[in-house]
Image (cartoon, rainbow, N blue to C red):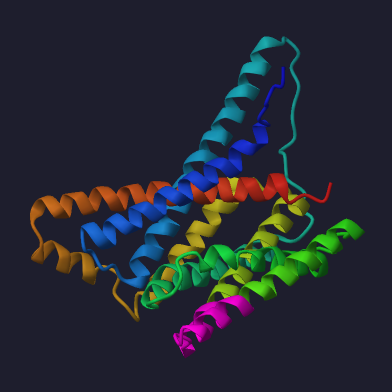
């Protein structure tokens, strides 16, 4: 009898897909059903707030658990001993680590703005185009993975990447040719393709930075998530001087019924939770699967 087994490490990418899918559905409900046109900085603030809260809660719980475990183990033995203050020896300086996390957060900030704010403004664009151009993430991650992290690439990797690159070019050529055939090719078609490639390149850059910090400096992934959320909130705060993030929600409160405003608050709270969950499993998946072992 054939048995089908699922590896435990498949749980992380599965939950990442689920949280991403649920957050996209929630965005559709907020924009289409509740007719709430959020500002660029508002959604970005909520996303980073979810990262910060989730990272802070889980990281604090882990620290408290470790302290409790040490205290429990010390009570079980009569041997008294002194333990020197444990100082983590990082591969890089703290300044470099925080600078790298800030750069990764900035790329996440720009990528989220492109995908959440600018993509919906393009009309008559295929909904599956982002998925079909997803191989750009693999190619950009490889380039950064190889040249920045100096990870060895074997022959079968190179062969796979060549095939992916050929398929990637074919998708772009077919997309442009299809639009030209139906006389719908516009300047916006080239812009959206370029924006998708740029946004996926930013994702690859962030993934490699996180991989470097996690693998070479042994930073707790939830601590990294918490710091990213903190830096993201600062970036959003700076951007708020250009665009007030709370203008739209105040306008919604004044023009819509109270029940609709309550529904909106519930949806926004869920958006914070889903953003925190999605980015938690994103960084865990990155640490688990993108290894050079």
Q: Quadrant of residue 24?
A: bottom left
State the residue lying farthest toward the bottom. 187
Query: Looking at the picture, does residue 17 appear above or below residue 202?
Result: above
Q: Residue at x 68, y 31 (%)?
A: 7
Residue closer to the observer: 90 or 198: 198
Query: Looking at the picture, does residue 157 appear above or below residue 242?
Result: above
Spot occupied by residue 213 in the image (x, y as percentages of width and height): 70, 56
- Number of callouts: 0
Query: Looking at the picture, does residue 118 appear above or below residue 209?
Result: below
Spot occupied by residue 210 in the image (x, y as percentages of width and height): 66, 57
Magenta region: 173-194
Q: Residue at x 58, y 50 (%)?
A: 282
Query: Looking at the picture, does residue 191 appear above or below residue 160?
Result: below
Q: Quadrant of residue 72?
A: top right
State the residue lying farthest toward the right. 155
Q: Is residue 179 left or right of residue 203?
A: left
Residue 164 visible somewhere in the drawing = yes
Spot occupied by residue 108 in the image (x, y as percentages of width and height): 54, 66
What's the magenta bit mostly, secondary-structure-wise? helix
Q: Residue at x 22, y 69 (%)?
A: 248
Q: Is residue 114 left or right of residue 37?
A: right
Spot occupied by residue 31 in the image (x, y as percentages of width and height): 27, 62
Q: Is residue 187 magenta?
A: yes
Residue 154 visible somewhere in the drawing = no
Q: Is residue 248 left or right of residue 110?
A: left
Q: Is residue 94 magenta?
A: no
Residue closer to the observer: 139 or 152: 139
For the N terminus, the image quarter is: top right
């Amino acid at each position: 009898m054939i048995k089908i087994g699922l590896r435990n490490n498949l749980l992380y990418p599965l939950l990442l897909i689920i949280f991403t899918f649920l957050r996209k559905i929630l965005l559709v409900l907020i924009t289409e059903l509740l007719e709430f046109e959020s500002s660029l900085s508002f959604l970005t603030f909520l996303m980073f707030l979810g990262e910060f809260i989730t990272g802070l809660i889980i990281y604090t719980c882990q620290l408290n658990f470790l302290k409790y475990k040490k205290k429990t183990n010390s009570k079980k033995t009569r041997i008294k001993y002194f333990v020197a203050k444990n100082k983590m020896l990082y591969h890089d300086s703290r300044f470099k680590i925080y600078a790298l996390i800030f750069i990764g957060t900035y790329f996440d900030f720009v990528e989220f703005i492109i995908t959440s704010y600018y993509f919906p403004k393009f009309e008559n664009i295929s909904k599956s185009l982002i998925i079909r151009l997803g191989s750009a993430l693999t190619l950009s991650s490889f380039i950064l993975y190889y040249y920045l992290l100096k990870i060895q690439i074997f022959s079968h990797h190179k062969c796979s990447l060549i095939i992916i690159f050929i398929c990637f070019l074919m998708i772009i050529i077919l997309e442009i040719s299809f639009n030209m055939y139906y006389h719908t090719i516009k300047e916006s078609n080239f812009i959206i393709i370029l924006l998708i490639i740029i946004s996926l390149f930013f994702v690859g850059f962030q993934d490699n930075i996180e991989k470097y910090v996690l693998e070479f400096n042994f930073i707790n992934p939830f601590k990294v998530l918490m710091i990213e959320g903190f830096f993201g909130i600062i970036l959003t705060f700076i951007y708020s001087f250009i665009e007030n993030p709370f203008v739209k929600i105040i306008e919604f409160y004044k023009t819509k019924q109270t029940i609709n405003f309550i529904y909106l608050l519930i949806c926004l709270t869920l958006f914070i939770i889903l953003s925190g969950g999605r980015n938690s499993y994103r960084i865990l998946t990155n640490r688990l699967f993108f290894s050079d072992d």
